[in-house]
Image: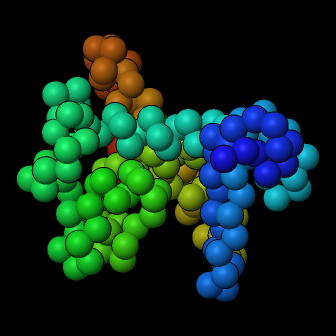
Amino acid sequence: MLCKICNKNPATIHIQEIVNGEKKSLHICAECAAKKSQSDPVLQGFNLAEMLYNLSGQIDMTQDEEHKEELSSAEPQNLLVCEDCGWDTAKFRKTGRLGCAKCYQVFREILTSALKNMHRGAMHVGKRPGGENNREAGKLMLEIMNLQKELDELVQREEYEKAAVVRDKINALKNNG
């Protein structure tokens, strides 16, 4: 399949948009995707290539090397499967979609990991409705989350003295607000 923009290169990126139940597809090459992400106002500030790369990488990382062959043969015992709709890891990898609301719980680890890398965090930190109290609470929560991330990194690097200081800061923020 050729790129729908340049009609020269093979389409390696396939974007599907569903608006009000109407499905639109766009099949483009990596070169046109890079141009489109820079020129399209909807995608400005959004690195399409990075997002697609990170998502595919996160899905692949959930399976260790010894299980990849087993997954490709689609043996059911090696797949996560949603009890409600029957959606499994193979379908999720193939379509990039989930089957029902419960799938978000079943595939939670895969989704959280992918979101962390795509959005540099798994929690929304943008604008929220509400007054000044909500904003202050949001800032406090964000500060605690950032300190927790720093704490995790310090512990991973075995810098326990620095980690203890950060832990104390977190506890002080939680107790005093």
Q: Nearer the viewer, residue 114 or 72?
A: 72
Tag count: 0
Residue at the image position 29 percent from the left and 39 percent from the top: 62
Q: Position of residue 20 (x, y in %)?
A: 67, 85
Asked where in the image residue 65 lies, by quadrant, the reply is: top left
Q: Position of residue 173 (x, y in %)?
A: 45, 48
Q: Say left or right for 103 vs 97.
A: left
Q: Nearer the viewer, residue 173 or 105?
A: 105
Q: Position of residue 78 (x, y in %)?
A: 13, 48
Q: Position of residue 145 (x, y in %)?
A: 46, 45
Q: Say left or right for 165 vs 67.
A: right
Q: Is residue 145 visible?
A: no
Residue at the image position 37 percent from the left and 58 percent from the top: 92
Residue at the image position 81 percent from the left and 37 percent from the top: 8
Q: Nearer the viewer, residue 115 or 146?
A: 115
Q: Is residue 118 above or below residue 111?
A: above
Q: Is residue 137 visible?
A: yes
Q: Residue placed farthest to the bottom in the image?
A: 20
The image's colour scheme reads rainbow
Residue at the image position 56 percent from the left and 58 percent from the top: 124
Q: Is residue 105 above or below residue 43?
A: below
Q: Residue placed farthest to the left in the image?
A: 77
Q: Say left or right for 177 vs 132.
A: left
